[in-house]
Structures are given as C-alpha cells and as structure tokens.
Amino acid sequence: MHGFLNIDKPAGMTSHDVVAHIRRAAHQKRVGHAGTLDPAATGVLVVALGNATRLIEYVQDSTSKRYLAMVQLGATTTTDDAEGAVLTTADVPPLGRAALEQALEPFRGQIMQVPPMYSALHHQGRRLHELAREGIVVERAARPVTIERLELLDWTTPLLTLDIMCSKGTYIRSLAHDLGEALGCGAHLQALRRTAVGTFLIEHATPLGHLINNPGDKQTSSRSADLPISVSQVLLPPEIAVADWPMITLDAEAVRLIRNGMAINLAGIHAERARAHGPEGDLLALLVRAGDLWKPEKVFDWS
C-alpha cells in the first residue's frame, strides 16, 4: 500500500507509537509520520505508507498547522504544559476581552520565539528534553515563526481557549508561556488538539482505535464510529501531499523520458514546480523548472 492516512491521535501515545500501530494494522514496514505530536496532545497526525513516505517533506515543511489550545493562567510549569511540575503560581488579574485581545496582538504575524527546553531540538549532539530532564538549562536562540491566526474563543478564569494557525516550528507551549509573561501572571498549556495539517482536517480524521488488523476487508463507504475500519478503506492517494501543485498529464513518450531522468518541454505552466501524472492517472514524478525545460526531481514506482 502507498498513500497517506489522516489519523486522530489519542492522548497518551507518542507519534512513534502511532506509526508502530499502523505498521501492524497494514502489515507494512515502511511507515512514517509528518510532524510529531506530544504524547499529551490529540488530533491530526499525518502518516505515510510505502513509497508515499518520499512525499512526507511536502506535508511536513510546506503546510500550516492549526490547533485548539487551552491555556491556563496563573501557573507556570517545568515543561510549559500540564505534564510538568508547577514552578510558580500567581493571582490572575481581572481580565476583560479587550485586555486579552491587546495581550494577544503582539503574537500575531511573524514573531520571534524561543523554543522550550522540553523539545526535540538538538544542542551539541543531545536533544534539549534530555538535558532538561537532567536539570540542565541551555541558552536557546529565538527563531522566526508565523502565527497566521490567533483567535480567542473563550475566556473563563483561569482558562483561555485559542484557535491557532501557525507555521512549521511553532511551539504552542512557548506561546502559552510567553502570553503568561505578557499578562504578568504566568501560564502553561493545559490541553492541545491539532485540528489541521494543511488540507488534512480533523473532521476527516480516523480515530486510531478504529483501525483493524485486516487490510483485506471489502471496501465500504461506512465510517460509523461503531464499526472497525481497515487501513485500505481510509488510505488517501500519494498525490494529496502535493495537491496544490499544478498537475500535468503526460503521454507515453514523455513518461519514457521522465522515467529515464530526462527533462521535457511543457507549455502553459506558470509555476516553478509541478506534479506529473501518467496516462492512467497515477502520480509519476515531481518536476522542477530548469530554464525552458522541466526536469524530474522525484520519480515514483507504485508497483
């Protein structure tokens, strides 16, 4: 099997645990995910199977992520989320919506953000979270991230509910911490649910627990929460990773050239990259512009 799964990850599992579950369900070794979710977080986890793993980078690097985040004011923790030990507590000042909107405004658009110590980033060959568990805190350089959407959905002291759309590399835990600093009372991320990764939406996600270890089941359109689902029933085609790229259907001669790594002429494509499909409709290759020609960047074999 080759393609993508839109999985609704449950709390308490690592992204690696989800991949292992799907390997068993699909009887397939080549499985990978496109963007880690913390164990406590739930929601959209995009998983690739087979040769579709070669397309993971286009899901992981080029798409916005959307989250539903619950931020608790008045307490900071060692991990900046509810999993850590409480470090400080403070009274939450009386805050109206106008004051909260004023505090949120500096976090919209392109901002500089310091990654948390409890993260998978590396420092001198070791992951930051390994150092943090040893009580070691190191200086982290602020990095540019983009907050495309930061909407206050609800405010019931001491909990804020936020709808966030952001770029790759954004840490919602850091956003919660920094917001608490701005409000003067401290804060941490109480709960997090990822609701979208690009075009992969939570409304269309399959709960992990609904997948069964039976990929040979007869296809059915039923998506009832009471029925088990086989991987093949919810497998999305590989090209969904680059669905927003211009699509070109090639004839047999152009297919031959591309399969041999040769560039071809294409007219009417006003872009720097495109996806090429064969006469039968299958994704054949990813193409990049090279002057007046188009050359294959990746060529696929789904057999």
Image: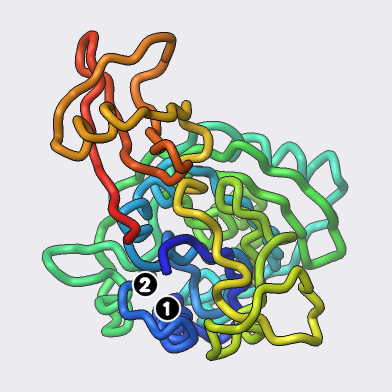
Residue situated in front as seen by the camera: 15 or 234? 234
Residue 269 found in image quarter: top left
Q: Secondary structure at mark 1?
A: helix
Residue 85 in sight: no
Residue 273 in sight: yes
Residue at the spot x=21%, y=26% of the render? 295
Residue situated in front as seen by the camera: 89 or 276? 276
- Circle 2 crowding by C-alpha within 10 Å: few under 14, some 14–19, many from 20: many
Mark toward the start of the polypeptide (2 vs 1): 1
Residue 65 in the figure: left or right of residue 101: left
Residue 157 found in image quarter: bottom right
**Horizontal and vertical percent position of residue 171:** 48, 56
**Residue contact between numbered discs 2 and 1, judged by CB atoms under 8 Å:** yes
**Horizontal and vertical percent position of residue 137:** 28, 69
Residue situated in front as seen by the camera: 42 or 3? 3
- Say which amino acid is labelled 2: Val
Residue at the spot x=14%, y=35% of the render? 261
The quarter of the picture where the N terminus appears is bottom left
- Circle 1 crowding by C-alpha within 10 Å: few under 14, some 14–19, many from 20: many
Residue at numbered disc 1: 19
Residue 151 in the figure: left or right of residue 210: right
- Say which amino acid is labelled 1: Val
Q: How is the image coloured?
A: rainbow
The quarter of the picture where the C terminus appears is bottom left
Residue 121 found in image quarter: bottom left
Residue at numbered disc 2: 31
Residue 151 in the figure: left or right of residue 206: right
